[in-house]
Image (cartoon, helix red, strand yellow):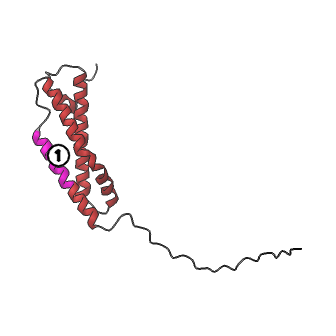
């Protein structure tokens, strides 16, 4: 007798059953996964900014990468919305969700920038070293006689 397994539905199963199983369905699954990854990335950035400030290098790295988050998120939402419009479905894009992402993004980037500007540099600038002032003895050159 075989044991039955309970299989958890993936997050992609949120796709409306009215959407035909086509390339659009697969693309929508990928877009929803990408959207969730960006949301997680922003949440991790926010946690690092609000957490232990001893890791300024991690905050700096996330800050440098954060410029791409918002436009990429917006692009994914537009693509999801265009697929939804093809099938008369508007359940995958929530304007409130975008507004929340956007406000969290700007708050987090602002806090990170403030932290990076007010904390001592994590990348210290090397101080110029003083040159050694050693006086060398001039070399002795051979004397040539001309005839």
- Residue 54 at x, y = what percent? 31, 63
Snapshot quadrant of residue 70: top left
User: Is the residue 54 above or below the residue 17 in the image?
Assistant: below
- Residue 82 at x, y = what percent? 17, 29
- Residue 68 at x, y = what percent? 27, 45
Q: Is residue 9 visible?
A: no
In this view, the residue in front, 52 or 124, is 124
Magenta run includes residue 105: yes
Q: What element carries label 1?
A: helix
Residue at x 18% of width, y 52% of height? 106
- Residue 52 at x, y = what percent? 27, 61
User: Is the residue 57 above or below the residue 29 in the image?
Assistant: below
Residue at x 22% of width, y 37% of height? 75
User: Is the residue 84 above or below the residue 120 in the image?
Assistant: above
What secondary structure do most residues of the magenta stretch adopt? Answer: helix
Q: Is residue 87 visible?
A: yes
- How many numbered callouts? 1
Crowd band around label 1 with a 10 angstrom C-alpha radius: few (<14), some (14–19), many (20+): many
Snapshot quadrant of residue 28: top left
Residue at x 18% of width, y 36% of height? 77
Q: Mark 1 points at which residue?
A: 101
Magenta run includes residue 138: no
Q: In which quarter of the image is the C terminus?
A: bottom right
**Taking 115 as reference, is 130 left or right?**
right
**Taking 111 as reference, is 132 left or right?**
right
Q: From which residue to which does the magenta span run?
A: 95-108
Residue at x 25% of width, y 27% of height? 27
**Taking 130 as reference, is 38 left or right?**
left
């Amino acid at each position: 007798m075989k044991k039955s397994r309970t299989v958890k539905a993936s997050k992609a199963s949120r796709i409306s059953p009215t959407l035909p199983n086509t390339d659009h369905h697969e693309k929508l699954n990928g877009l929803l996964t990408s959207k969730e990854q960006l949301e997680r990335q922003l949440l991790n950035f926010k946690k690092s900014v609000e957490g232990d400030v001893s890791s300024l290098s991690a905050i700096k790295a996330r800050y440098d990468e954060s410029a791409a988050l918002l436009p990429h998120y917006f692009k994914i939402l537009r693509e999801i919305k265009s697929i939804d419009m093809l099938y008369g479905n508007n359940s995958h894009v929530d304007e409130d969700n975008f507004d929340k992402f956007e406000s969290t993004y700007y708050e987090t980037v602002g806090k990170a920038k403030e932290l990076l500007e007010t904390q001592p540099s994590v990348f210290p600038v090397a101080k110029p070293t003083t040159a050694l002032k050693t006086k060398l003895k001039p070399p002795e050159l051979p004397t040539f006689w001309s005839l």
